[in-house]
Amino acid sequence: MHAEVDITSDNRLFGTNGIRGVVNQTLTPDVALKIAESIGTFFDEGEIIIGYDSRTSNTMLVKIISSGLAATGCNIHVGGLAPTPCIQHTARNRRLDGGVMITASHNPPQFNGIKVLGSDGVEISRQEEAEIEETFCTSKLNHVDWQKIGKKDMLSDAHEEYKKAIKRHIDCEIVERKRFRVVVDPVNGVGGLITPNLLKELGCQVTTINADIDGRFPSRPPEPRPENLQELSTIVKARQADLGVAFDGDADRAIFVDEKGEVQWGDRTFALIEEFLLETEQVKKIVTPISSSQIITDVAEKHGAEVILTKVGSTAVSHTMKKTKAKLGGEENGGVFYGPHQPVRDGAMTTALLLNVMARTQKKLSDVIKALPQYFLEKDTIKCPTELKSLILKKLTDEVRNENLTFDTIDGVKIRYPNASSILIRPSGTEPLYRFYAEAKTKDRASKLVRDYRRKLSKLMHA
């Protein structure tokens, strides 16, 4: 499930979450330079922060993108190696005009990418992305006079400012008293630069694994999926730790392992944070993608809160939170958006929030998870040529409508059945395939929904 955008074939830049491609294949030096110049033209000689993750190709891309921004008159403030949410926080905290984060998030090491941030640190809107794409396609670039070429400086203290901001939103004293034992797996990425130190400052006894910065990600794939986290699970049990946390490459998502070594998927830990904040803060709205679990709605309804569903993708969640003034958002992949801090995915903030919940409840993670409504989630994909995606979606929607089923079309088709079972079928925004997300009270029911609709989509494609 690799989010590659075929930049060279149709001049398309932005996918579901920024621009991504294989370095020196689709994301070549000349393409990267033109992207940077298009971004710089958009920001109109603004003050821009640039940050990057641990990928080896950043040796090349940081210089290229900095040059493109400078050529259009932007002044560049280098945030350096840092998690994406740290760079986002700095953009807003330093009152800059915008930012560029060079990262491919959870993709393999041969990929890299570019996230464009607004002045508030949130990734720019789809409409603003379209403006940059139009500039890229038309080559109407603002190359300034040689005397106006942008300047560059190095920012200091960004990591410290970010840590302090996180600590302002939790009860540090109660967390410190618990002396939690935590194992951190930053997958040789930038998450290891901040979170271990943050946790030590919160009184935690910290063990790190896979913490050496290495953009080849030799320890495990950067996607923090359960099948990639067996080492973390083993060490959590061996160290008798209270918690394990695994990040993706740019540390905006966090997946947790409980004290028994069981990987808890993002919906469950988000639901824990959701319930805690609904009980303790003035949280009335929860923003989450259509792909999220029913557990999020169950918890919200229990406390009389509103759930606002969006398309899949962190940008959709962030901008909906801004529009509705919601304080909390979350995704099933481990992304939690805490508005009072910043309405973006933030792995370190999520970790601190979860420790705060555990300290307040005085319970082990497995116990508080067990108290939540239980659902089983099954995922799968099926290949589908990009040119057929729209036609297949129309056929599927017509078929579902003719069967008088309850469904939503926020993003693809989500079909809801009695007894709290559902399946979302949606075309990938970045790859030639369809994705299935099935959920039910039993694993067998969820698996059957995937099998049934996989067959149905296959027939529609070959009809």
Image (tube, grey):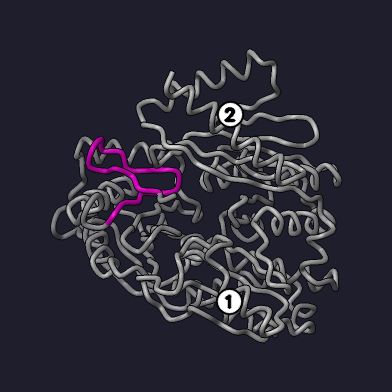
Magenta stretch contains residue 8: yes
Give residue 38's mark: none
Front one among 263 and 112: 263
Q: Secondary structure at mark 1?
A: strand
Tag 2 residue: 413
Q: Is residue 124 above or below residue 241?
A: above
Q: Is residue 306 above or below residue 335?
A: above
Q: How many marks?
A: 2
Residue at x 62% of width, y 38% of height: 290
Residue at x 74% of width, y 83% of height: 176
Callout 2 amino acid? Val
Crowd band around label 1 with a 10 angstrom C-alpha radius: few (<14), some (14–19), many (20+): many
| Image position, residue 106 (x, y; %) | 45, 59
Determine the image quadrant of residue 66. bottom left
Q: Decide if residue 72 is in sight here.
A: no
Q: Decide if residue 398 is in sight here.
A: yes
First along the sequence among labels 2 and 1: 1
Magenta stretch contains residue 87: no
Q: Is residue 180 above or below residue 149?
A: below
Q: In the rendered view, does 369 fall on the left or right side of 209?
A: right
Secondary structure mainly formed by the magenta segment: loop
**Contact (Cβ within 8 Å) of mark 2 with mark 1:** no
Determine the image quadrant of residue 447. top right
Give residue 184's mark: 1
What is the span of residues highlighted in magenta in the rendered image?
Answer: 3-22
